[in-house]
Image (spheres, helix red, strand yellow):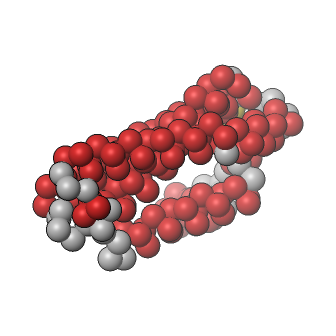
Amino acid sequence: YLITHLYMLVCKIFFCRSTKVIFMKIKHTNAVILSGVTWLVIGSFLLFKGLHYTLFASVFHADASPLLSLFAKKSNGTMILIALGITIGYAKGKFVFPRTVKRVVKRILQQEEPFPLKNLYSRGYLILIGSMICLGMAMRFSPVPFDIRGVVDTAVGTALIVGSLLYFKQA
């Protein structure tokens, strides 16, 4: 809604035209695919970032990494941490995210076709996404060691990628 109001303000100030906002409309199948693509892109980004943090910790900060210090060989520890993150993420994507995907797809299918893109997600879902972004930013600026950040980002990225496949199956 903030973007809508900013758009209307810009139209009034600069263009002196009508402030009627036209929202893009989307069909059910495209909305489900859009949700899947969104999860896939964000999950791929987080997986890459998690792998980067884990490898960075093993090469540059091996002595200050609490999880890597549990292993005699840092290379073995790195591989185990990556496998751990992928396993946790796969389990979360396989057993936790199906409920979320079903709930979102059900909401999409209850909309009139085509429906405004702004109605794609509920307010509660958008608040959840915003809080996850804030949590990620807080973790970025907090003194969490790189190996822990790597495992968390790898797990969340893998979970989102597995969850995106659920969206594609529903489409």
Q: Is residue 95 left or right of residue 67?
A: right
The quadrant holding residue 6 is bottom right
Which residue extends farthest left?
60
* Viewer can see residue 117: no
Q: Is residue 76 left or right of residue 104?
A: left
Residue 152 placement (x, y as % from top left): 43, 56
- Number of marks drawn: 0
The quadrant holding residue 143 is bottom left
Towards the viewer: 26 or 86: 86
Examine the rendered structure and indicate whether residue 15 appears above or below residue 157: below
* Viewer can see residue 100: yes
Residue 29 placement (x, y as % from top left): 70, 25
Q: Is residue 21 left or right of residue 40?
A: right
Residue drawn at x 21%, y 71% as measured from the top left: 64
Residue drawn at x 25%, y 56% as measured from the top left: 71
Residue drawn at x 18%, y 62% as measured from the top left: 62
User: Which image quadrant: the C terminus?
Assistant: top right
Residue drawn at x 35%, y 72% as measured from the top left: 144
Examine the rendered structure and indicate whether residue 49 appears above or below residue 164: below
